[in-house]
């Protein structure tokens, strides 16, 4: 949550900061603010609402201000007001601070600061840290080398909770200090300029050289230099990494919304996920970063998947696929629950986490809990250099490209595809035959093309969406691997159109949810060809007998599922069972997107949500 940008260099800071904030606005858009070092001290501008409001208010910031920090907020502590927007300024006016995270002991720090004469203007937990830095600063000798940096370090030693921060000091007008613990922070290394941000997208186009800070590290930036140390003042030898994507990938291009763009990027994202990941004999998958040898993997008795939100649904799909094709028992946990449970796990359990950003705090802490208990861990993530990618024993990168839309689309289908490849990989280590492996590889290779065929029906799905956009309740119903897709369909609709929706196993509908059925509650059914198709058809008949509108997504031919069975039918290509969940996902993404557009919702910035959840 929240987006931080910092710039120190030789150019006008405000324009660079605002450009960075617009690229980070998916991380939070309740309010925004910036602070720049100016000749007369420090200029701070804060506005509730979107970054555009801040841009209008900042038109008078002088071009001579070459150092600054900025923030776009997802509210945790305090209402959405100008006063609660970041940056927060210490009551002595010397420090401005942007913060992503939660300071859990803020009340104790606030009382301490008040007892020493510091005052507060906001309802936030962040302001206490600005004043605590000011307190430590005034205790250090005047003229002391790195007095600013030392004050930040000492203040952080007292902080409980999570933070990614960027700090300015009036006495050090060409310097920014940043630090992280639990919230992502990246240094952008430029030529005569350096930057700090929550995400590399903030400075792509200015530099592709980045340093991913680890927890407990502090960055001290000037225009011509940078220094990375720990909070305990230990030297760090930083590793400069290269960002492997271009600015065009994070821009809208011809599309209206990032969600729309990312839906239609899925054939390419799926192609990237499989590229170079099949054996020479085309009978199994191969992964370069697992860091666990096949002999050890053969000894695994159970898999535990942990994730949050949409990624949790991908884990549920993985459960169905891996148990079916690899015959390994799989459990799926909400990461937020697993980290606080004392779940008994067999010693031969492998823990896998899934996170698009690689920074989801609950998933990261579940990973750390598993490692503390001595379990081997793997991760599926989309962001090279993310915290989860660095801390796991091994992992698989999605290579889906940047996903800006808050509602995940291409990352989800990429995760499902990698889950199917894991099912193939584990299956071939066990009892999946060579022939069956070849069949799965052939099916997986076809996925990008089949996805394009589904997306070619966008106009038809748009027409269906207009028909249903006025309803306020939906049910999504599927069986087996389609049950997680039902959950995902309901989530997508809730996220971006604010329609109440629920996902259920289709057979469970008659055990309670059928009470909701009426002409005002449409049902979306997933009806793949196969052994449960007749059961799904019976469930559809039960809904229609009660005058419930039905949308059916199916791969069955017309002689098995006729056109008059449902009010609207969306047909997807018949495919191998391992890839069906991907193909059935695409129509529900389009349906949710077009319904949200018809209801004039802000698709890319749905209310109360943010893309990367880095607070509890």
Image: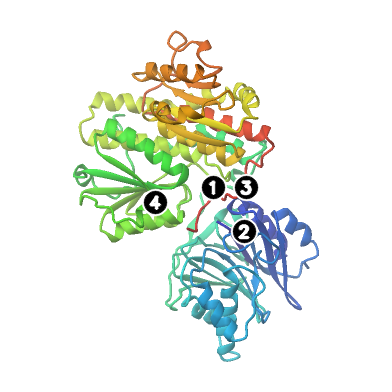
Q: Nearer the viewer, mark 4 or mark 1?
A: 4
- Are the two marked residues, 3 and 4, in contact with CB atoms closer than 8 angstroms? no
Question: What is the secondary structure assignment of the residue under circle 4?
Answer: helix
Q: CA distance from mark 2 to mark 3?
A: 13 Å
- Are the two marked residues, 2 and 3, in contact with CB atoms closer than 8 angstroms? no
Mark 3 or 1 closer to N-term? 1
Q: Nearer the viewer, mark 2 or mark 1?
A: 2
Q: Seen in the image, is 91 located left or right of residue 551?
A: right
Mark 3 or 4 closer to N-term? 4
User: Which residue in the protein does label 2 denote?
Assistant: 73
Q: Where, by quadrant of the figure, is residue 58 drawn?
A: bottom right
Q: CA distance from mark 4 to mark 1?
A: 29 Å
- Are the two marked residues, 4 and 1, in contact with CB atoms closer than 8 angstroms? no
Mark 2 or 1 closer to N-term? 2
User: Which residue in the protein does label 1 denote?
Assistant: 245
Could you classify mark 4 by the number of other residues whose Cα lies within 10 Å: few (under 14), some (14-19), or many (20 or more)? many
Q: CA distance from mark 3 to mark 1?
A: 29 Å
Q: Nearer the viewer, residue 89 or 234?
A: 89
Q: Is residue 285 visible?
A: no
Mark 2 or 4 closer to N-term? 2
Q: Nearer the viewer, mark 2 or mark 3?
A: 3
User: Which residue in the protein does label 4 denote?
Assistant: 335
- Residue 444 position (above or below residue 388): above
Question: What is the secondary structure assignment of the residue under circle 1?
Answer: loop
Mark 2 or 3 closer to N-term? 2
User: Which residue in the protein does label 3 denote?
Assistant: 607
Q: CA distance from mark 3 to mark 4?
A: 24 Å
Question: What is the secondary structure assignment of the residue under circle 3?
Answer: loop
């Amino acid at each position: 949550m929240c987006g931080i940008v910092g710039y120190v260099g030789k150019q006008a800071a405000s324009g660079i900061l605002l450009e960075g904030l617009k690229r980070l606005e998916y991380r939070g858009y309740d309010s925004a603010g910036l602070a720049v070092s100016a000749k007369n001290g420090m200029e701070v501008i804060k506005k509730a609402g979107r970054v555009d409001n801040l841009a209008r208010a900042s038109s008078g910031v002088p071009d001579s201000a070459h150092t600054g920090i900025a923030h776009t907020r997802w509210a945790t502590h305090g209402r959405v007001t100008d006063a609660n927007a970041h940056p927060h300024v210490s009551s002595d006016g010397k420090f401005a601070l942007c913060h992503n995270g939660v300071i859990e002991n803020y009340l104790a720090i606030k009382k301490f600061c008040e007892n020493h004469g510091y005052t507060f203007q906001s309802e936030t937990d962040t302001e206490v840290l600005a004043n605590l830095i000011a307190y430590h600063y005034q205790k250090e000798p005047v003229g002391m080398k790195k007095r600013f940096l030392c004050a930040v370090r000492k203040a952080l030693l007292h902080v409980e909770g999570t933070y990614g921060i960027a700090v300015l000091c009036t006495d050090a007008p060409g310097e920014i200090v940043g630090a992280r613990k639990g919230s992502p922070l990246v240094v952008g290394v430029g030529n005569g300029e350096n930057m700090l941000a929550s995400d590399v997208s903030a400075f792509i186009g200015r530099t592709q050289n980045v340093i991913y800070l680890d927890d407990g590290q502090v960055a001290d930036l000037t225009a011509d230099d940078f220094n990375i140390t720990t909070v305990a003042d230990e030297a760090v030898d930083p590793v400069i990494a290269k960002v492997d994507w271009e600015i065009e990938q994070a821009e809208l291009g011809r599309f209206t919304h990032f969600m729309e763009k990312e839906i239609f990027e899925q054939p390419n994202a799926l192609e990237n996920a499989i590229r170079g990941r099949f054996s020479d004999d085309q009978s199994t998958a191969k992964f370069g970063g697992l860091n666990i040898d096949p002999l050890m993997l053969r000894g695994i008795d159970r898999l535990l998947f942990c994730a949050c939100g949409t990624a949790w649904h991908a884990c549920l799909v993985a459960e169905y696929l891996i148990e079916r094709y690899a015959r390994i028992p799989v459990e799926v946990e909400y990461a937020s629950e697993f980290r606080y449970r004392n779940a008994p796990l067999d010693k031969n359990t492998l823990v896998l986490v899934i996170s698009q950003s690689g920074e989801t705090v609950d998933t990261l802490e579940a990973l750390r809990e598993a490692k503390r208990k001595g379990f081997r861990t793997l991760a599926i993530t989309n962001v090279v250099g993310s915290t989860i990618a660095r801390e796991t024993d091994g992992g698989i990168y999605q290579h889906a490209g940047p996903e800006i839309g808050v509602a995940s689309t291409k990352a989800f289908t990429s995760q499902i595809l990698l889950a199917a490849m894991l099912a193939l990989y584990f299956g071939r280590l066990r009892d999946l035959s060579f022939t069956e492996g070849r069949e799965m590889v052939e099916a997986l290779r076809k996925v990008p093309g089949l996805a394009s065929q589904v997306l070619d029906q966008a106009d038809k799905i748009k027409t269906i969406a207009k028909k249903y956009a006025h309803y306020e309740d939906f049910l999504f119903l599927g069986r087996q691997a389609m049950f997680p897709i039902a959950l995902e369909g309901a989530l997508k609709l809730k996220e971006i159109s604010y329609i109440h929706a629920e996902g259920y196993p289709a057979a469970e509908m008659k055990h309670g949810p059928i009470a909701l059925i009426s002409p005002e509650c449409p049902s979306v059914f997933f009806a793949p060809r196969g052994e449960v198709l007749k059961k799904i058809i019976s469930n559809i008949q039960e809904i229609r007998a009660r005058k419930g509108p039905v949308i059916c997504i199916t791969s069955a031919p017309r002689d098995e599922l006729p056109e008059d069975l449902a009010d609207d039918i969306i047909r997807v290509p018949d495919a191998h069972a391992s890839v069906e969940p991907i193909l059935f996902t695409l129509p529900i993404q389009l349906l949710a997107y077009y319904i949200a557009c018809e209801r004039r919702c802000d698709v890319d910035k749905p209310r109360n949500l943010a893309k990367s959840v880095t607070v509890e």
